Image (cartoon, rainbow, N blue to C red):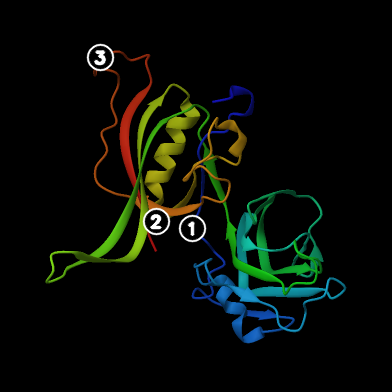
Amino acid sequence: MNQLFFNGIKFFSDNNALLSLSGTASASSAAANAGDAFNGNRAFGWTSEGENNDSITSYIERDFGTDLSGDTIVIANHNLKAFAIKINGSYLQNYCESTKRNFSVITFPARSDIRTIRIETAKTETANEEKHIGEIMLLTTIGQFEDPQKVTNSLVLEQGNLKLQNGKHFIFNCGESWAFTIEIFALAQCDIDLLQKLRDLGTPFHIWPCGGTEVQFAYNFRPYFFNDFFKVAFSGDSKPNLKDGLYYGTGLRDTIKLVEVE
């Protein structure tokens, strides 16, 4: 690990932009499918129609019907070369945007008056393609670990296994999910407070294992790509303790398990 680029695991709230919560979705074309970018599944999303020209500005918009809070917008599984963001009809000016692997994270000063979000774009990565966005999320940053933590990842494959009469097997895949076991060794009070804050939520939240910096790893593999971003919840018990239960100056020891959820 390159300490120069170290960014700890980062956590965000649940997604406020889900169409199932309230409001409407619209777009410059294929408007009937605009809601597919707000359904929590980035695999499909919204694709424009008849706008496969870099001189045409396309848009997709979410009207929440009420004021929401947030400080982060995620645009996942997209082919946009550049885009502009409007909040409540005005272009977002003061923000930081990072894009890698067709996954963009836009952070801005926290607001509590977010009623509409519009993504506008003309150019695509490959010139003159239809614009595509898999998912748009509105999130609030919960926090980020200051110190490295030991993480054990599991990719759980749900499979059907049908044994054939000839003794061979027919395997069919039903889906996959990630699970994370984090062995907490926290000497920073801010990390201890973050863990408690996550527990107190009582709802699912998002984990960004790379913390926003893929280059901090000597080798690249899932789930540490920039676009590896998972909705999770606590599973099972935790055991917050002092080291050996004796030494009061040695921080928190704990083990938590987070599993991917819908």
Give the x, y percent position of residue 147.
50, 26
Mark 3 and mark 2: span between their CA atoms? 33 Å
The residue that disc 1 covers is 14
Mark 3, other Cα within 10 Å: few <14 / some 14–19 / many ≥20: few
The residue that disc 2 covers is 203
| Looking at the image, residue 92 lies above or below residue 117 | above
Q: Quadrant of residue 172?
A: bottom left
Mark 1 vs 2, N-terminal side = 1
Is there a contact, CB below 8 Å, between mark 3 and mark 2?
no
| Looking at the image, residue 69 lies above or below residue 119 | above
Give the residue type that dot 1 points to.
Answer: Asp
Mark 3 vs 1, N-terminal side = 1
Q: Which mark is residue 246?
A: 3
Q: Does residue 260 appear in the picture of this structure?
A: no
| Looking at the image, residue 219 lies above or below residue 66 | above
Give the x, y percent position of residue 131.
71, 72
Is there a contact, CB below 8 Å, between mark 3 and mark 1?
no
Give the x, y percent position of residue 39.
51, 72
Q: Nearer the viewer, residue 175 or 38?
A: 175
Mark 3 and mark 1: span between their CA atoms? 37 Å
Give the residue type that dot 3 points to.
Answer: Leu
Q: Residue at x 39, y 56 (%)?
A: 203
